[in-house]
Amino acid sequence: MPQTMTEKILARAAGRTEVHAGEEVTARPDFVIAYDFPGYTDVFFKETREDFGIAQVERPERFVLFIDHMVPAATPKEEELHKVTRAWGREQGVTVVERDGIGHQVSAEQGYAVPGAFVVHFDGHVSQLGAFGAFAFGARKGIIESFVTDGATLTVPATVKVELTGALRPGVMARDVFHHLVRVMGPASCQFQAVELSGPVIDAMSIEGRQTLCGQAMFLGATTMLIAPDERTLAYVRERSRITLDPVYPDADAVYAHHWKIDVSDLEPIVVVPPSPANTRNLTEFTGLEVHSGYLGSCASGRIEDLRAAADVLRGRQIQPGFQLHVVPTSRAIMAQAAREGLLETLVEAGAFVSSPSCDYCFGRIATMSDGQRAVSTGTLNTPGRMGSVDSEIYLCNAAVVAASALEGRIADPRPYLATVASAGTNAGSTTP
Amino acid sequence: MSLANLAGRAAWVFPEDDYDIDLIVGVRNIKITDVAELASLAMADYTPDFAAGVQRGDVLIGGHNFGYGHPHYPAMRAMRHLGITAVIAESFSPGFFRGETSMGFPLITCPGIRDAVSRGDPVEVDWATSVVRLPARGLALPLQPFSASERGMLEAGGLIPYLQQRQVAA
């Protein structure tokens, strides 16, 4: 029978020739990824040892732990958590990656995003490894199965095929495309399903734009999202992959639960208004709304093309006095590249507060808002209270919108600023890798 | 081993689709780890009498895609502490479903449930016949069956005891 990418990956990982949507399988994860977080990793370590009597995890090389939340630590208790993580890694022979950036990005940079791989994390945003053709899913606390055994049990998801046609207009970024999908398809449209993204828009899109799209799969209700590897993917992973697997492609006659064809030629920049990531609206409906802070970063955004877009808007300009613009590159490698390209200089001169990579801005652990404040954000989520007071508001948007809003102190359209840049030869939201 | 049938009342009906469960204790409180404190905060933003009114065995009723957003654990920890034994909804967000099922807490998919139930109605879950019964309304709605491992986790009381049983059996 023909198979989807998901079915092929899970069949191999389950040691089978084929599996099909709807059947439950126990498959062998190629990688088990986690970040340290209280109530998660500390508990997994303890359960593994005490509830299962396992002194040494099987195949420690399949694990990688990231220290990316609570970085830098703000309390002794937080640092204690990191110490426990480092000690467990040493004891088990498990790699612990610290201060290299947000794990979902760094795992791609460091070779855990292998086309065809089966990857388990507890956090669903790991779906962004699907940008490289891996099947990566968030098992929540179910990940403990992969600590105490060499397997992970799941029901093989059916696949929704989403073909994106047309071409993106200037000023429209991957971020906008994702939220547009939520608007068109619905936040529950892909429940318990995998999404295969394809089409000319994906073909033309940078690796990092694809990461942005795939990482937000949960907001379509999906288990994960995948893109079949192309030359761009293979070039990225060639020097990085930690294991060798055959890339996986869907069969031409694979069976899909649904097939969407969505033309994005007319798509405009969007804004996702509180209180839910399901509320996609056109940016132009909200321009002029006063905002007090802006966050450019997270595992969804904060990569080099996001920083370039923001720098294009901010170059030679000053943000509104009193506006709090926080720019947090997604990884150390990206931050270094931004430095080499002069982007950090541009951002800092414009008045941005630029920090080293950390997850902490995304969930309001720092740069916290108080009652009545309002932020534009490239973070993952806009639930009231996520970035501080429940009486503050989060408007999700692309990086250029954050930058333009910082200039005006109001939700602003970046396209007029970008137009002056485009005529000078660069283009935010461009498709360069 | 088999699951005990459930019988209680609908302690709350969430009419919203895509309900973000962080709102149950309030996003500002999701870093609280003390379960009694979390329980005291449950639904406080909706009604002051929620915690006091819950009886052991009660259930929650939800709409489509219940648990959309980030499926953090404090909300259901609080609810279990109060005596809530299940959530019955039109459908669930997968991350939330996986996370709570591995806690041994049944999330029951039951199309039609939201509009059939009012707060306070008696609700029964009969596993053998795979139905949710609403005695006051004379209704029995079919529930979506669990996979083998989901059923195993619920019967064992969670993923940890379920995996321990598998470890012993192996």
Image (spheres, rainbow, N blue to C red):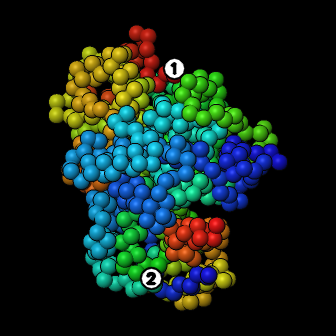
Extreme-left residue of the structure = A322
Residue toward you, A322 or A328: A328
Which residue shows up at 20% across the image and 50% down it?
Answer: A75
In the image, residue A373 lies at what x, y percent?
Answer: 23, 46
Where A307 sits versus B17, above or below?
Answer: above
Instruction: Report whether A233 appears left or right of A10.
Output: left
Residue A90 visible in this rendered orientation of the protein: yes
Identify the disc placed on residue A432: 1
In the image, residue A138 lies at what x, y percent?
Answer: 52, 52
What amino acid type is highlighted by mark number 2? Asp
Which residue shows up at 52% across the image and 63% down it?
Answer: B97
User: Subunit of mark 2?
Assistant: B
In the image, residue A351 lies at what x, y percent?
Answer: 21, 26
In the image, residue A264 lies at what x, y percent?
Answer: 57, 33
- Name the residue carrying label 2: B58
Where A411 sits versus A423, above or below?
Answer: below
The picture quadrant where one finds residue A309 is top left
Identify the disc placed on residue A310: none
Instruction: Report whether A207 appears left or right of A34.
Output: right
The secondary structure type at the circle numbered 2 is loop
Which residue shows up at 39% across the image and 86% down it?
Answer: B55
Extreme-right residue of the structure = A1
Count the marks: 2
